Amino acid sequence: MSAAAPEISVVIPCLNEEEAVGAVVDQAWEGISASGRPGEVIVVDNRSTDRSAEVAADHGAIVVREERPGYGSAYLAGLAVARGDYIVMGDADETYPIRDLAPFVARLAAGDDLVMGSRFEGTIHGEAMPWLNRHVGNPILTGLLNVLFGVKISDAHCGMRAVRREALETLDLHSTGMEFASEMVFKAFRRKLRVSEIPIDYYPRVGESKLNRFGDAWRHVRFMLLYSPSWLYFVPGAILLVIGVLGAIALAAGPVTVLGHTWQIHSLFLCMFAILLGTQVVQLGIFARAFAYAHLGETDALVERARERLRLEHGLAAGGVLLLAGVVTLFVIFVAWAFDGFGALSHEYATALGFTAVAVGTQVVLGSFFLGLLTMRTTEPSRAVIVERVPVA
């Protein structure tokens, strides 16, 4: 163990890895020695019921006990006590070549903020990765991350990675489960940090796997969707809205014949449904992005531009116009219906469009108020300036 202040901190989460953790700690010390920099090895004991903590300590590791379960919880605890400028992360089951950490540290020292290992660009030995994980699970999850967040990486869930200490504040990590791995990657890209990859070897694990293949995969997917309002809300909502509006315009004057088929009021009802549902979904996306920007510290160029150009009153005006148009349309139809003695309604299409305009206008008005509440700052910094100090007689 180095007596100098550590430049490198190797953080290793551990849950019942008595068989392997000692060897992993030794490999971490080998890697630190090969790098030529002082370092420390931190093993986060995540409620192990075997001798993992004792074995790690015997091999020179600092052992941190984290009672909250979860992969992310363990890493958050380890990162909180790590003192090095360069933090290397790896598992306690001998699957990753921790002794080869020097290139990761060199990349960080050269200016990268996050350096990822890539098992797919390197060598996967034997049965280290099950066929389903190798050819289905990991490619799909990495592909989703790349598509949803504009990430360009080959192995988003590799457990061996390194990060600069000063980048951790920018990343602002919170996830407590396996989705911690996804959070680190997409936030690094979203917040314009420098990210690179290094091919690594991947070995069969020692001991029993703790992964829940489908449960952990779903946690990753759920997390990515929650942090991707554009794909979860805007894309499907906008498609519904455009289809509904175009169809409603085409049917506004009555039945139309297209491709040899006559589209009547039942088709208009479907378009109304698409408009109403699309409006709600898009509105939820706006709320999500605004909340993330105002309260979660997320940067969002679109929200910033909207805040500069749009106010609550703009939303109220737009919703009010729709609401007024719908009310006027329905009022005219009602008056004509009353003069006809409340007989058969002869303006079915216009009536349907009038009710749709009222519903959408009401949503926009109330949604504008709710958006104003979401983006309201609870405290404002004081702008008071001392102009002159007057001595007291």
Image (cartoon, helix red, strand yellow):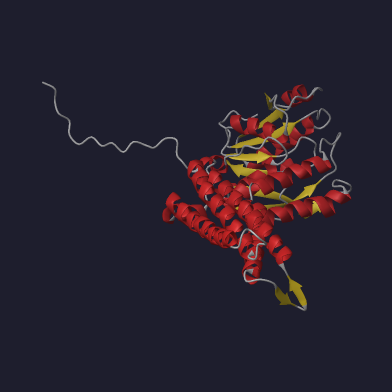
Q: Position of residue 130 (x, y in %)?
A: 87, 47
Residue nearest the viewer, comparing 155 with 93: 155
In this picture, residue 311 sits left or right of residue 117:
left
Residue nearest the viewer, comparing 215 with 229: 229
The residue drawn where x is 66% and y is 65% is 243
The residue drawn where x is 65% and y is 40% is 88
Quarter of the image containing the N terminus? top right
| Image height of 90 relative to 311, above or below | above
Tell how many labels: 0
In this picture, residue 140 sits left or right of residue 5:
right
Quarter of the image containing the C terminus? top left
Q: Is residue 150 something that shows in the picture?
A: no
The residue drawn where x is 72% and y is 24% is 57
| Image height of 171 relative to 306, above or below | above
**Residue extending furthest toward the front:** 341
Q: Position of residue 33 (x, y in %)?
A: 66, 38
**Residue extending furthest toward the left:** 393
In this picture, residue 192 sits left or right of residue 200:
left
Q: Position of residue 391 (x, y in %)?
A: 13, 25
Q: Position of residue 288 (x, y in %)?
A: 58, 47
